Image (spheres, rainbow, N blue to C red):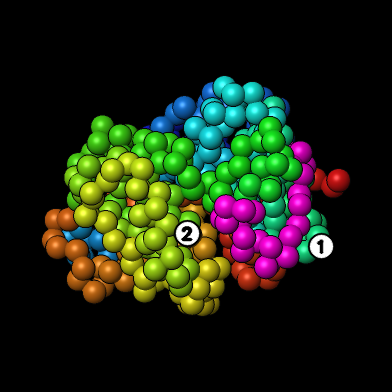
C-alpha cells in the first residue's frame, strides 16, 4: 500500500505540504491560517496512522520497522504535545480555569503547541520563558504571541526553581485561576493521553519494541503506565542527564502503582547534549528522510532515528524483531534551527515564518 493511501484525508493534505523541501513558507502560512480559523480541537480525537518503513538496512538485519506518525495528528499541536495536553485542557475547560501557565525555553515545542491549543480552546496561556526578552522575536515565540500567549521572561536561576514547591505556591497565588502545567507538559494528566498510543498500537499491530525520544520523561512514563509490561520500551535520551530523566519517569509513575520492569533509557545517543548534533548526524537524518519521505528534526525524533540505526549496526535486535518508532512531532523546531543557522534552510522542510506583529 502506498503511504499516502493510509493517511486520513486532512492529514494527507498536510503531508503534501510538509514533505517537499522546496516548498516555500507562503504555502505553509496559508495552511496555518486556515487551520487556526477553521479547525477545532475536536479533530484531535483522531488516532495517528501507523506506517511501515522500507529501508535496505532493515532488510539486511531482518527486522521490521514501523513508525507511529504522531507528527500527523495535527500540523501545529503535533506529536506527544497533544497527547500530553489533552487531559490538561479538559481539566481547564471543565473547571472553568482562566487558562494555563507553563514553562519552556525560547524555542520550546511545548510552548508553541500550548499557545495554539489554548487559542483554539478559547482559554488564556502564559509562558514562563527561560532567557531574555529579546527572544520574543524568534521563530517559536512570535508564533506563541500571535496565538495570544503572554510571555514572561525569567533568568536561568529563577527558571531552575520551576519545580520547587515554594516557587509554585507563589506562582499559583499570582495566577489563582490558572492551571500550572510543568515544563514539557509532563504531569499526571499527561500519562493517560500518551497511554492512548499503546491502546492504538495494540489495535493496529503486534510488535516487540517501542522506541521514543525522551526529554522530560512524560511520554515514556505514559507509555509505561499503559503497556502493562507487554513490550520492551526504549527511551532515547536527547540530553545528558540520564539520571535526572530516570528520576522524572519514576516520579511520574509513583501514583500509578507501576511495577513495570520492561523499560530503560538509553543514554549514549544524545549526540553531545540537548539541541546538539554533528554535521554527519544532519546528513544521516536528511538522507533517511529523503529515502522514506518521512520528516524528522535533529533535536528529538532525529536522535531516536539515529539511535535505531546505530543499534541495528551493533546487533542489538534479534532477527525477525518488530520495532515501532514513535514520531513525537516537533517539526516546528526546524524554523528556530534555521533561524540560528544550525541547519541550512534550503535542505529541510521548514514551517512558515510568523506573521508580522
> Residue at the spot x=52%, y=59% of the render?
297
Where residue 309 appears, as percent x and y from the top left, is 32, 67
Residue 28 position within the rendered picture, expressed as x and y whole percent measured from the top left: 67, 44
Q: Residue furthest right?
A: 357
> Residue 229: x, y in percent?
20, 47
Above or below, 339 against 174 in this view is: below
| Residue drawn at point x = 14 percent, y = 56 percent | 320
Q: Is residue 333 magenta?
A: no
Quarter assignment of residue 306? bottom left
Q: CA distance from mark 1 to mark 2?
A: 25 Å
Left/right placement of residue 256 relative to residue 87 reads left
Q: Check the picture and name the quadrant holding the N terminus.
A: top left
Q: In this rendering, would 210 be left or right of 107? A: left
- Along the horizontal axis of the image, is 37 left or right of 305? right
- Tell me the SS state at disc 1: helix
When asked about the image quadrant of residue 42, the answer is: top right
**Label 2: which residue?**
215
Q: Kindly identify the residue that appears in the image at 76 percent across and 38 percent down.
A: 148
Task: Identify the mark at residue 134; answer none if there is no mark.
Answer: 1
Residue range highlighted in magenta: 146-167
Tag 1 near tag 2, CB within 8 Å: no
Q: Residue furthest left?
A: 319
Q: Position of residue 225 (x, y in %)?
A: 31, 43
- Disc sitting over residue 8 in the figure: none
Is any atom of residue 19 visible in this view?
no
Amino acid at each position: 500500500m502506498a503511504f499516502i493511501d493510509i493517511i486520513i484525508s486532512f492529514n494527507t493534505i498536510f503531508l503534501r505540504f510538509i514533505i517537499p523541501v522546496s516548498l516555500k513558507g507562503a504555502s505553509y502560512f496559508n495552511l496555518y491560517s486556515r487551520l487556526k480559523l477553521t479547525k477545532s480541537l475536536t479533530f484531535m480525537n483522531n488516532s495517528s496512522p501507523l506506517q511501515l518503513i522500507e529501508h535496505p538496512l532493515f532488510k539486511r538485519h531482518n527486522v521490521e520497522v514501523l513508525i507511529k506518525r504522531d507528527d500527523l495528528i495535527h500540523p501545529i499541536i503535533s506529536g506527544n504535545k497533544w497527547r500530553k495536553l489533552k487531559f490538561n485542557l479538559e481539566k481547564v475547560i471543565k473547571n472553568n480555569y482562566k487558562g494555563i501557565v507553563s514553562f519552556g525555553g525560547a524555542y520550546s515545542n511545548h510552548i508553541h503547541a500550548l499557545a495554539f491549543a489554548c487559542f483554539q480552546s478559547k482559554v488564556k496561556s502564559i509562558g514562563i520563558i527561560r532567557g531574555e526578552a529579546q527572544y520574543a522575536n524568534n521563530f517559536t515565540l512570535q508564533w506563541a504571541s500571535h496565538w495570544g500567549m503572554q510571555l514572561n521572561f525569567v533568568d536561568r536561576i529563577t527558571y531552575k526553581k520551576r519545580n520547587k514547591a515554594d516557587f509554585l505556591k507563589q506562582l499559583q497565588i499570582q495566577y489563582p485561576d490558572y492551571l500550572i502545567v510543568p515544563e514539557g507538559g509532563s504531569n499526571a494528566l499527561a500519562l493517560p493521553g500518551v497511554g492512548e498510543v499503546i491502546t492504538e498500537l495494540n489495535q493496529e499491530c503486534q510488535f516487540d519494541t517501542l522506541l521514543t525520544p525522551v526529554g522530560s520523561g512524560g511520554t515514556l512514563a505514559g507509555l509505561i503506565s499503559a503497556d502493562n509490561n507487554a513490550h520492551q520500551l526504549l527511551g532515547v535520551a536527547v540530553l545528558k542527564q540520564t539520571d535526572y530523566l530516570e528520576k522524572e519517569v519514576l516520579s511520574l509513575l509513583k501514583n500509578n502503582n507501576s511495577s513495570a520492569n520492561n523499560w530503560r533509557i538509553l543514554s549514549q545517543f544524545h549526540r553531545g547534549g540537548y539541541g546538539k548534533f554533528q554535521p554527519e548526524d544532519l546528513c544521516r537524518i536528511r538522507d533517511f528522510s529523503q529515502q522514506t519521505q518521512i520528516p524528522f528534526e535533529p533535536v528529538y525524533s532525529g536522535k531516536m532515528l539515529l539511535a535505531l540505526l546505530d543499534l541495528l549496526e551493533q546487533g542489538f535486535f534479534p532477527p525477525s524483531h518488530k520495532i515501532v518508532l514513535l514520531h513525537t512531532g516537533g517539526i516546528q523546531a526546524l524554523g528556530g534551527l534555521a533561524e540560528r543557522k544550525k541547519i541550512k534552510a534550503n535542505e529541510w522542510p521548514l514551517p512558515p515564518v510568523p506573521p508580522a506583529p
